Amino acid sequence: MQDLKIRFLIVDDDKNIRRLCTTIGTSLGFECAEADSGQAALNSLDTTAPDIILADLMMPNMSGLEFLDEVKKLAPRTEVAIMTGHGSIEAAVRAMRMGAYDFITKPFRIEELKLLLQRMEEKVNLVAENQFLRERVSADSDLNGIIGSSAKIQDVLRMVARLKDTRTPVLITGESGTGKELVARAIHYRGALAKKPFVAVDCGSLVPTLIESELFGYEKGAFTGANRSKEGLFQAANNGSIFLDEIGELPMEMQAKLLRVLQEKEVRPVGRNDKVRVDVRVIAATNRDLEASYREGTFRKDLFFRLNVVTIHMPSLRERRSDIPLLVNFFLDKYAQGKTLHVSDAAMKAMLEYDWPGNVRELENCIERAVALGSDTVLDIHDLPPAMRAALGQTGYLSASTHSVPAPSFSSSAASLAPRSVESASATDLEELEKATIQRVFAQVNGDKALALKMLGISRATLYRKLKRYGINLDKSISAAAS
């Protein structure tokens, strides 16, 4: 996972001030950029919205106040601080009324600016974290496929929360079946572009001779069979996002044309002389090592760096085994609605042991198959796919007791609140953890049952059964947490 640094933009017509601020920002670990005028800074917002801006009040052509007003329209979440001279305090106060975070008076001490930037950083991180927590509760059902409580998946969700309101290109890496498209959709649908088009393109399935016409469109008569003009996928995604899945499969010739589109923001349909403007956010995904590919000469280096501004790595399922019970429950709810289908200890243990080369997609297919072919009451070891049973049998995992501790049992009507080391936890430990989790969640939401149900991912009936089973008094739990 690539860390997403605080993006810091310094706007001042004085080169020495910009250089000093850049040095200070770099010392704080920020990713720094400079602009010598308000207009130049606004132009840069088209591609990357900074987290923090430090702008001079007195600049030629566009004042700091005018610049602030435009920034708040284009990037309302960006924190802006104003640099001002001693005689401009009144204007600085006006800037704060317009939405500036704070102001600093020139000449300033290095420690004074550091403190201001650190406070701005804290606010940016706090807002991002609060947003992330809210979205875990209020995410639309079609985005709930990103399931898991493991640290690696939570890191992915935090990255989504940071990126969703930017237009920064994103490269999503990971093995097939890990959920790369789910992440791309989450970035699009949870952000500012949610009501704009989202177009997914499987680069590996495009017919080589038709790739250009599919992506960029064509004019009537451009080739045999082109009986009418057709817009390409980039035009269909205009003002929204295009998801280029398995981008490593694109031929070198198309990589060059794609790079020109990303740089020039325009496409030329096949058979047409003029170009068409497109404003598209690009999210790419690959199961290949693109860095190795460009070193081997099979992927363009310049395209790689154009796409690889921020990388999100989707972990394989074997890297986050503790999420398997949560995923099993999610897919049971999806494919066994209305049934009380229990997963036996042996079946859950087998799923925890298996390496899942096909990742989450393979697990989903496994549960769908078991629901379709198994009994209506228990999903057991014999309901798992033969290939999976064979693989486990060969390693001895299904023999008498690979682990002395039984795996937890789950059902389609009760969500798992499993710990991060499910394999080594006892049944008693799991029950205690589940009880503690329910109490903690209710304390966090101040007793709001609807909100708690969403955070826990269980039905109302299941919740009441668990409250009764564990003898939880919600009023006492909330007051105890508050104190």
Image (cartoon, grey):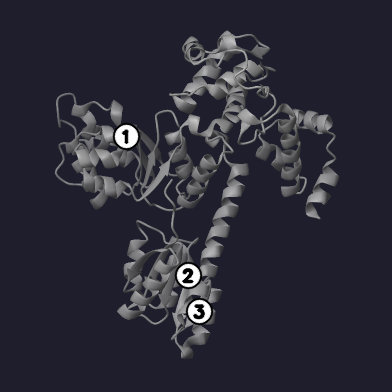
In the rendered view, would you say 415 is above or below 256?
above
Describe the element under mark 1 as helix, strand or loop: loop
According to the picture, the residue beneath numbered tag 2 turns out to be 80
The label on residue 112 is 3
Are the two marked residues, 2 and 1, in contact with CB atoms closer than 8 angstroms? Answer: no
Q: Is residue 407 visible?
A: yes
Tell me which amino acid carries mark 3. Glu
Q: Nearer the viewer, mark 3 or mark 2?
A: 3
Give coordinates of residue 232: x percent, y percent: 28, 36
Q: How many marks?
A: 3
Cα separation, mark 3 vs mark 2, equals 16 Å
Q: Residues within 10 Å of mark 1 (few under 14, many from 20)?
A: some
N-terminal label among 3 and 1? 3
Judging depth in this view, the residue of 141 and 98 nearest the camera is: 141
Tell me the element at label 2.
Answer: strand
The residue at the point 81 percent across, 55 percent down is 483
Q: What amino acid is found at the position of numbered circle 1 in the picture?
A: Arg
* Relative image position of residue 263 (x, y in whole percent): 24, 51
Q: Callout 3: few (<14), some (14-19), or many (20+) C-alpha neighbours within 10 Å?
A: few
Question: Looking at the rendered structure, which numbered label has been put on residue 288?
Answer: 1
Residue 269, visible in the rendered structure: no
Label 2 Cα neighbours within 10 Å, binned few <14 / some 14-19 / many ≥20? many
144 left or right of 188? right
Mark 2 and mark 1 lie on one chain; the one further toward the N terminus is: 2
Which numbered disc, 3 or 2, marks the residue that appears first in the sequence? 2
